[in-house]
Image: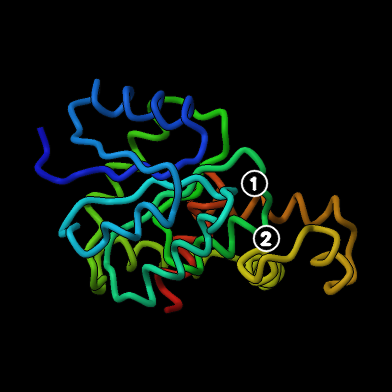
């Protein structure tokens, strides 16, 4: 069993309990909170672990929680879960420093992989072999693929990227698929995360 505690923040009691059960079955220590404010009220006593939070919650959203943690100087890694995700929200979450952004419904393997990444996340990232690989992959992108990547990381939907570049949304989709393949990104969150890791 890991010494680190996984802090689950979700206003939906069924979803909260279900996720806690899944994580406990996988041998993690878990604490649950019905709101972001309830979690923040205990932040001073939390020394390690990571946070899994829903995005849409009354009182304070998951995104607001992430920003509050940054403002408080907390280095706790965060994984966001939502049933209402979209590209701009995912990009904004990654920019705010979340480790991963997962849409419901998600597989057990997906959440556990995100959790392992979160627990392994270092508070102060350093230049690594992974970043060197990302830079090498970016070198293989064409100029147009780089332009599409810039649009994606900026949080723009395909239609806006298409308008800015003077091409069709379908062509943007093709370029996006190509650059995700070249970057070895399994999903949008991974693409944004690796790009920001070498640009920050």
Estimate how packed mark 2 is, as few (under 14), some (14 to 19) or many (20 or more) residues with alpha carbons within 10 Å: some
**Residue 113 occupies quadrant:** top left
The numbered disc on residue 62 is none
Residue 190, position in %: x, y? Answer: 48, 52
The quarter of the image holding the C terminus is bottom left
The numbered disc on residue 85 is 1
Please give left or right for residue 199 compared with residue 3 in the image.
right
Q: Residue at x 46, y 41 (%)?
A: 10
Q: Residue at x 61, y 67 (%)?
A: 153
Q: Residue at x 89, y 69 (%)?
A: 163
Q: CA distance from mark 1 to mark 2?
A: 9 Å
Residue 99, position in %: x, y? Answer: 39, 55
Residue that badge 2 annotates:
88
**Mark 1 falls on what kind of element?**
loop
Residue 156, position in %: x, y? Answer: 73, 65
Please give left or right for residue 68 compared with residue 169 in the image.
left
In the rendered image of this protein, does residue 24 appear above or below residue 36?
above
**Residue 124 occupies quadrant:** bottom left
Estimate how packed mark 1 is, as few (under 14), some (14 to 19) or many (20 or more) residues with alpha carbons within 10 Å: some
Q: Please name whichever residue, 116 or 32, is drawn nearer the observer in this view of the structure.
A: 32
**Mark 2 falls on what kind of element?**
helix
In the rendered image of this protein, does residue 126 appear above or below residue 40?
below
Q: Residue at x 55, y 50 (%)?
A: 55
Please give left or right for residue 18 compared with residue 180 in the image.
left
Residue 168, position in %: x, y? Answer: 90, 58
Q: How many marks?
A: 2
In the rendered image of this protein, does residue 181 appear above or below residue 136?
above
């Amino acid at each position: 069993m890991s010494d680190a505690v996984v802090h689950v923040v979700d206003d939906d009691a069924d979803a909260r309990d279900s996720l806690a059960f899944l994580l406990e079955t996988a041998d993690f220590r878990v604490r649950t909170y019905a709101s972001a404010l309830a979690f923040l009220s205990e932040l001073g006593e939390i020394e390690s672990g990571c946070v899994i939070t829903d995005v849409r919650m009354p009182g304070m959203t998951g995104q607001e929680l992430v920003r509050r943690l940054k403002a408080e100087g907390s280095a706790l890694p965060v994984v966001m879960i939502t049933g209402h995700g979209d590209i701009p929200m995912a990009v904004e979450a990654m920019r705010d420093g979340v480790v991963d952004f997962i849409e419901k419904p998600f597989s057990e393997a997906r959440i556990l992989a995100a959790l392992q990444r979160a627990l392994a996340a270092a508070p102060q990232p350093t230049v690594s072999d992974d970043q060197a690989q990302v830079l090498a992959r970016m070198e293989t992108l064409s100029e147009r693929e780089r332009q599409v990547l810039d649009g994606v990381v900026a949080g723009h939907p395909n239609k806006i990227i298409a308008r800015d570049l003077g091409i069709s949304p379908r062509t943007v989709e093709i370029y996006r698929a190509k650059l995700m393949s070249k970057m070895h990104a399994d999903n949008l969150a991974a693409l944004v995360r690796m790009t920001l890791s070498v640009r920050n």
